[in-house]
């Protein structure tokens, strides 16, 4: 039998080889760590937990709201969108579905920081796919909040309702997979009776609208015919309470993103015999909470009417169609276990038609009617004024242009030297100082002269144009005249 020879490697050599192999493996590990794409969606109810749960709601309760926050995390560098899909409508075990007007939702305006919220107004939770949000083009991470509302109905069907909503994170122009997060929704409704507080309009709609169409500078503002809202509290609430009006999002915005000046809308209150309505005023405080009514000490039922009307300068707000939502809120003053409750929501719509107009008055009449009386070298210079009113809500700078048809001349065509017929602008009134105007007398030359250039925001202005006429010793006698007009021009 052939003998086998066994060679044994010295221990220290074996250890060196093992270490070398380990280091080679470890070095390879260090330089092959992959870069992972992050594309995720997190949905968090404000009450905590993983479900959206409404407490038991009776018809005499107030409108209930629940909020969730959606957080999108992405580093794929692609734009994305968030959509909502109702997987299972809110319904009972036997198939009774909650009315769509009872279960609604809306996103909180400005709760996002980068992308665009596409679905702004409160509306029923639709069974159709609803796009809620689109990211910026870079696909940056962002978040926004959704509010779901459940409104008590007098004829609501009692039962425990269950539903499921899916939120879908979808990349745009990318092969990255969608992310779907499901949210369970629960609601417990008691048998219906009569609502505790009713908010209704005189027209029966859920809309309050005002328009500047037809309004003039001297238009008489009549309360009759303007929109009215009736607020009725049914029965005693057991504790003193207050009723407020509050704008959702704290403002009313136009499609162009302009914020409406709330001081240009006024309101008045009538009724409320058992409590104390507040005094009439403008609508500025509604950006936070406008107090409308305070009940008596025991919280007796009562009703009052709120009338909306435009202020005199309503038409001077920047042109556009402004929309918003007005909540009516009841707040009990004693510790009743509930905070402020929204008892009614109305759509607001203010239509400001474009306005770009000039009016001039002189000698107590409309138009340019300069009168210097008898002027001679002995009497010295004489003055005559024209009051100019510019009404503009275009939000753009403009110029007021004077057009002089020709030199001052008499019936014999004898002319007054242009340096003896001069003009300047004075007594300027407006929100902002104009960019420029004629501060010192200059000749009122034939042709066009810019009297005033507005501020960059193109605010309305009121000012006076002063004309001065001077006679020389050799000036011929006679009746001198010329024609002067004014025009407006946007820059």
Image (cartoon, helix red, strand yellow):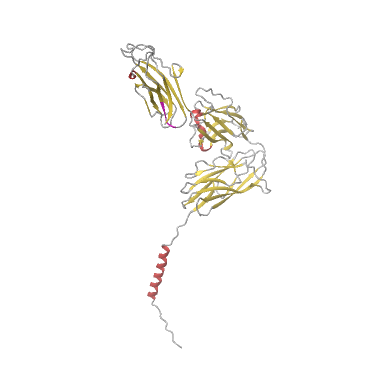
Quadrant position of residue 379: top left
Considering every residue shown, the one lying at the far left of the view is 473
* Residue 332 seen: no
Quadrant position of residue 345: top right
In this picture, is 118 found above or below 400? below
Left or right of 472 in this view: 265: right
x, y percent for residue 323: 53, 35
* Residue 215 seen: yes
Q: Work out whether residue 174 or residue 200 is closer to the camera in this orientation and state it.
A: 174
x, y percent for residue 104: 59, 42
Q: Work out whether residue 220 or residue 184 is closer to the camera in this orientation and state it.
A: 220
Which stretch appears magenta?
396-400
Task: Confirm whether the magenta stretch covers residue 160.
Answer: no
Q: Work out whether residue 261 or residue 419 is closer to the camera in this orientation and state it.
A: 419
In this picture, is 162 found above or below 317? below
Q: Residue at x 45, y 19 (%)?
A: 367
Quadrant position of residue 375: top left
Left or right of 480 in this view: 212: right
Q: Work out whether residue 373 or residue 280 is closer to the camera in this orientation and state it.
A: 373
The quadrant of the rendering that contains the C terminus is top left
In this picture, is 40 found above or below 444? below
x, y percent for residue 215: 52, 26
x, y percent for residue 316: 48, 28
Main secondary structure of the magenta stretch? strand
């Amino acid at each position: 039998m052939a003998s086998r020879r066994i060679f044994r490697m010295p221990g220290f050599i074996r250890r060196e080889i093992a270490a070398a192999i380990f280091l080679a493996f470890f070095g390879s590990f260090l330089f092959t760590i992959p870069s992972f794409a992050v594309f995720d969606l997190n949905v968090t109810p404000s009450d905590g937990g993983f479900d959206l749960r409404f407490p038991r709601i009776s018809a005499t309760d107030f409108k209930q709201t629940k909020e969730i926050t959606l957080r999108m995390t992405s580093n794929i560098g692609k734009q994305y969108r968030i959509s909502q899909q109702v997987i299972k409508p809110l319904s009972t075990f036997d198939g009774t579905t909650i009315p769509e007007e009872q279960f609604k939702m809306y996103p909180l305006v400005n709760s996002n920081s980068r992308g665009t919220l596409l679905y702004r107004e409160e509306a029923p939770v639709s069974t159709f796919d609803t796009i809620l949000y689109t990211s910026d083009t870079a696909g940056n991470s962002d978040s926004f909040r959704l509010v779901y509302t459940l409104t008590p109905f007098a004829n609501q069907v009692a039962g425990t309702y269950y539903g499921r909503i899916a939120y879908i994170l979808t990349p745009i122009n990318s092969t990255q997979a969608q992310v779907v997060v499901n949210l369970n929704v629960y609601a417990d409704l008691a048998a219906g009776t009569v609502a505790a507080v009713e908010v209704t309009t005189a027209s029966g709609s859920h809309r309050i609208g005002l328009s500047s169409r037809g309004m003039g500078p001297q238009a008489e503002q009549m309360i009759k015919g303007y929109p009215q809202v009736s607020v009725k509290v049914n029965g005693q609430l057991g504790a003193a309470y207050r009723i407020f009006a509050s704008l959702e999002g704290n403002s009313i915005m136009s499609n162009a993103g302009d914020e409406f000046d709330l001081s240009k809308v006024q309101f008045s209150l009538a009724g409320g015999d058992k409590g104390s309505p507040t005094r009439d005023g403008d609508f500025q405080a509604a950006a936070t909470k406008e107090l409308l009514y305070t009940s008596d000490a025991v919280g007796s039922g009562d009703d009052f009417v709120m009338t909306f009307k435009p202020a005199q300068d309503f038409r001077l707000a920047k042109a556009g169609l402004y929309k918003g939502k007005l909540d009516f809120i009841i707040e009990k003053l004693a510790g009743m276990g509930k905070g402020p409750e929204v008892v009614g929501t109305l759509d607001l719509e203010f239509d400001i038609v474009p306005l770009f107009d000039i009016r001039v008055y002189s000698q107590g009449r409309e138009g340019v009617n300069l009168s210097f009386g008898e002027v001679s070298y002995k009497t010295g210079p004489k003055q005559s004024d024209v009051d100019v009113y510019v009404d503009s809500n275009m939000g753009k700078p403009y110029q007021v242009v004077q057009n002089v048809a020709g030199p001052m001349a008499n019936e014999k065509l004898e002319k007054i030297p242009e340096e003896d017929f001069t003009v300047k602008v004075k007594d300027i009134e407006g929100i902002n100082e104009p960019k420029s105007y004629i501060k010192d007398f200059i000749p009122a030359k034939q042709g066009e002269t810019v009297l005033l250039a507005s501020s960059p925001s193109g605010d309305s202005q009121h000012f006076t144009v002063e004309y001065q006429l001077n006679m020389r010793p050799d000036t011929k006698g006679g009746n001198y005249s010329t024609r002067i007009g004014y025009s407006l021009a946007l820059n």
